[in-house]
Image (cartoon, coloured by chain):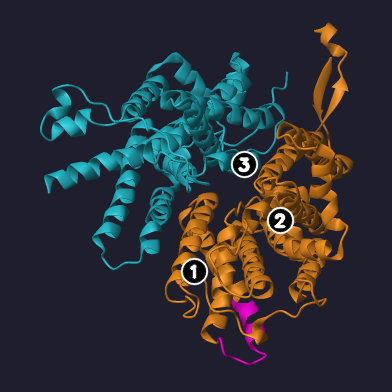
Chain colours: A orange, B cyan
Amino acid sequence: MLRLEPRSTRSFAAAWLSPVMALVLTAITGGVIFLTMGKDPTTALYIYFVEPLTTTSGLSEVAVKAGPLILIGIGLSFGFRAGIWNIGAEGQYIAGAIAGGGLAVYFYDSESTLLLPAMLVLGTLGGMAWAAVPALLKTRFNANEILVSLMLVYVAELLLVHLVQGPWRNPQGWGFPGTRMFPDVAALPLLFSGKRAHLGTLITLAVPFIAWFILARTRFGFTVRVFGSAPLAARHAGVHSHRMIWQSLLIGGGLAGLAGVIEATGTIGQLMPDISPGYGFTAIIVAFLGRLHPVGVLLAGVAIAVTYIGGEGAQISAGLPKAVTGLFQGIILFYLLAFDLFTRYRFVVSTRIAEH
Amino acid sequence: MAELIIASVMTMMTAATPLMFAATGELICERSGVLNLGVEGMMLIGAVFGFATAAATGSAPLGLLIAGTSGILASLIFAVLTLSLLSNQVATGLALTIFGTGLSALVGLAYVGETIDRIAAIHLPVLSDLPVVGQLLFGHDPLVYLGFIVLVCVAWFLNRSRWGMILRAVGDSDVSAHAIGYPVVLIRYAAVAFGGLMAGLGGGYLSLVYTPLWAEHMTAGRGWIALALVVFASWRPGRVLFGAILFGGITILQLNAQAAGLGIPASFMSMLPYIATIVVLVLISRDVVRIRLNAPACLGRPFRAER
């Protein structure tokens, strides 16, 4: 008879094996799904999970997609560690794109080299401002941050639609929703000619290591870790929960906003209604898959980005709907959560049943 | 003028009904101590499978049945993970919503642009033709009435029935309920499944009655608004009705204002339900004592029988 028994400490091995197992099982489940859709599973899986990594342009695209996922995922992991559930990163991402991109809309004929840094700063501030609303309402009025941050996603989306269809619409855009193209000085320099990977990608790569340093080596990082694992102890040690709520929401919002403005100016070059294929929500999966650890989030961001690019490739070459990617993302998280049982519990063969 | 008011009330009820279904289900789920944030996902799954069934068979009632069933199946994924595998309820609920969004988008691809025969409003001879009250009392679609009936039954169940008391006990003190000998996990499975059924029906209502077509992410946050409604209602069924009608009213207000052309951009009017949700949450939640008194004490906490 198998019995669940709590572990005295969380299993390190199980915690890192669980995302690997989740990815493997998702691939197997994906194969079954492709079979039922009448496609050859090995070819489809190859297109999804391997092909994006085999060409330089594929790798560049993976880097472009992984960028926002990693940035947002890192920001969210701070809050999730502290038990503060900011799930409105999508809204903060859009708010960042609006705040930073708006500058380029107003100074569309600018030639100043200050424009780009100003946009990045404004974008970060825009995301922080959007996240400050749930922080304020949570600390001041006890309002649930999950629901408030999520409602603000819809508000941000509608605001963006309003701006790009109305006041900010490109006068030479033949009525299509979207702003003017940003000026050249606003663009993030490309890393390789002919590829879309840009300077923002490098910023993204630096952030996990800064975050790792903060978590592992600073007093703030320590309080985040304590607050998440032992809230009562943290309170006794003088960690103020209101301050923790503000800090984690502002970090999450700021990084999401930065991701938004980088995407708008580096990857797209204008504001338009579809500036996000759901990065803010997918980043939640990235944060969990990366075990809320900065380096883990980096790896998970790349892994999920591969499925995005694979999904696009599969649509073109195998006629598979892109929507499969969204399904995969949900399934990965399900498997991950299931396997996480083993970080806290283990199965033991029970011999004591007979004695009772 | 009277006609306009009647028409507004009628559409208000159709806007309120999906929220009422979803919130009633989530209320039972939360009263058993389980926080399922997957309402939006379950509604989408219900909406798409309900629509697909109706499109394939031509029968909207059958579609509704499948909508409810698929809602239950989706909720059982959540139940297995949180109740048997003890996963974090917040994370698992989010996963269910992400999964439901992806699955519904995939399944729905084949149905974009298709239409079906919606479930029509009832028409009783004589009664429905009465002036004013005829329409208001006897002219809705059958699901509006079903929503009411379910809500009354749930109110009775929670407050007056033995099993309702047991459900509340499980939600307020799982350890004690277990010690007395009640099957905590089993009861929670049932509560989660009921939540799935109701969310599925709410989603089905959207695609089979409210707007009889499939559009990707057509729930547009109603699952989340339903979650907020449960807090707004302080976990009491009667107030769910009030809250759902309030939000139905806001939706209609927004549509009418857009039609009247007040000069306010349409996007801003569309923000209204979401902003109203935030305002309502703030107004209710600021009374910390009231929330603490009314919220199920074990909400969101995993339970594992020691012996």
In the rendered image, which residue does mark 1 sit on?
A177
Q: Which mark is residue A77?
A: 2
Depth check, mark 3 against mark 2: the one in front is: 3
The mark closer to the camera, 1 or 2, is 1
Label number found at residue B106: 3
Q: Badge 1, how many Cα within 10 Å: few under 14, some, many 20+? A: some
Q: x and y percent of residue B289 in the render?
A: 44, 44
Q: Nearer the viewer, residue A208 or A44?
A: A44
Crowdedness near tag 2: few (<14), some (14–19) or many (≥20) residues, C-alpha within 10 Å: many
Callouts 1 and 2 close, C-beta under 8 Å: no
Return the x and y of residue A355 as percentages of the image width and height: 84, 7
Whether residue A254 sits left or right of residue A45 in the image: it is left
Residue A167 appears in the picture as rendered: yes
Q: CA distance from mark 1 to mark 2?
A: 34 Å
- Relative to A120, is A343 above or below? above
Q: Is residue B25 left or right of residue A17?
A: left
Hey, which quadrant is residue B64 in on the image? top left
Q: Which residues are magenta?
A: A108-122
User: Does the magenta-highlighted stretch encompass residue A111?
Assistant: yes
Q: Residue at x 55, y 87 (%)?
A: A107
**Picture coordinates of residue A121, whole percent (x, y):** 63, 78
In the rendered structure, the answer to whether residue B255 lies left or right of residue A292 reads left
The amino acid on which the numbered mark 1 sits, given as a three-letter code, is: Pro
Disc 3 to disc 1, C-alpha distance = 26 Å
Relative to B181, residue B260 above or below: below
Determine the chain carrying the residue at label 3.
Answer: B
* Secondary structure category for the residue under label 3: helix
| Number of numbered callouts drawn | 3
Residue type of the residue flagged with mark 2: Ser
Type of the residue with mark 3:
Leu
Magenta highlight on residue A106: no
